[in-house]
Image: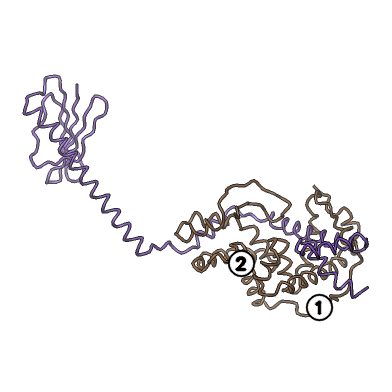
Chain colours: A purple, B brown
Amino acid sequence: MTNEREEIGPLLSAYGDGELSPVEQRRIEALLAADPELAQRLDDQLALSSALVKSLDAEVDEIDFSGFADEVMAKLPPPTVSLASRIRTFFENAFEFRKLQVALGAATVAAVAVVTVPYLRGDVGEGDRIAALVMNGQGQEADRTASAAPPALDPSASVLSVETAGDYETMLFKTSAGTTIIYVREVQ
Amino acid sequence: MNLINLSCVSPGRVEPKRLEIDDLTLVRRCKEGDRPAFKLLVQKYERKVYAIAFGMVKDREEARDIAQEAFLKVHRSLGTFKGDASFSTWLHRIVRNLAIDKIRAKRNESLSFDDAVGADEEVEPGFIATRLGTDPQRGALRRELAAKLNEALAQLPLKHREILLLREVEGMSYEDLAQTLDVPKGTVMSRLFHARSKMQKLLEGYLDEDPLAFASGGDEG
């Protein structure tokens, strides 16, 4: 009987874990049905498993994990970027820069057209209000005008941007000397 | 598919799912340098990793250190993870190894346990179940009973402690246990049986101390 129990012990343990083959499972179930003491041993195992999990669960519940992941993340080495990734990023940036150049070029053409065509055609009427804010190379205000007539356009100025918001058209120019000129023109 | 279920240690207790990304997807994203994905893995497993570490070393600070080191080691070794075993099996193997290193470093492992507690002595059948209760609906264990269980666990030989923890806390299959511990499946079966028998024997001694203290078997709450 003792030998049989010694043999059954590991099988009973595995039965409680659901790790037996169907044949072994049926064998243990038959034994359990016939031997109440064996059934009690299985109860002991299940009770122990449950209690062990609960006791560790209670322990873990007392630990504050709110900053744990951040602590781990803070100890990670700085991200390293692979050479392939750096090459890819370089070309992507270069492509973006090329697109920006194309966009600026288009904006320049549009701005020049907006500014020069009315001049050439004498379309600037009396009702047009033009303000110019001239910034020096350090970004400080150098001059400010508000008049019905536009200020003389520096021939070296290049258009950085042209925007229209509501009734106003804003043009941003930059001269070769580094001076920034902002024109605000009321459009009709 | 192995979906993330951010449940806590107890298999009986279920917390709401916060995300539905499987481990392998997260690991792949981590390998691509996605740090938030790694943080998700940490948050998913921090409780279980800590529980296993604590079960092994029985010291909160050390368990926390081990848990942290385990995740850092995981991050360092992600490139070697091929996905042959599940991520959780791999992770818990790392935790187990770190805990063993820590225990060995302290050199406080009780090597003479088998002499002190007869492995073959059997506890009176039903004793443990009667004292601890088998009703899964019952609430949390009393604090002192939890302490006794942890104390008993700490007295088990390392090989029994680790297999019990990996089985009960992580819920590892015998197959995963065999892989993690690098032993045949038959050894897993017999080692678990002996671990449980010793644990029951130890608890019998504890529960005999003050029968009234544990009579409720954890009805509190």
Please report contact status of discs 2 and 1: CB closer than 8 Å, yes or no: no
Dot 2 or dot 1, earlier in sequence: 2
Whole-percent x, y for residue A41 in the image: 87, 63
Compared with A162, B155 (above or below) is: below
Q: Quadrant of residue B46?
A: bottom right
Query: Dot 2 lies on which element?
Result: helix
Q: Label 1 belongs to which residue?
A: B114
Disc 2 target residue: B66
For badge 2, the amino acid type reads Ile
Q: Is A172 located above or below residue B6 in the figure?
A: above
Q: Position of residue A44 (x, y in %)?
A: 85, 61
Specify the subunit that label 2 lies on. Answer: B
Disc 2 versus disc 1: nearer the observer? 1
**Chain under label 1?**
B
Front position in the image: A106 or B65: A106
**What amino acid type should be assigned to the residue bearing mark 1?**
Asp
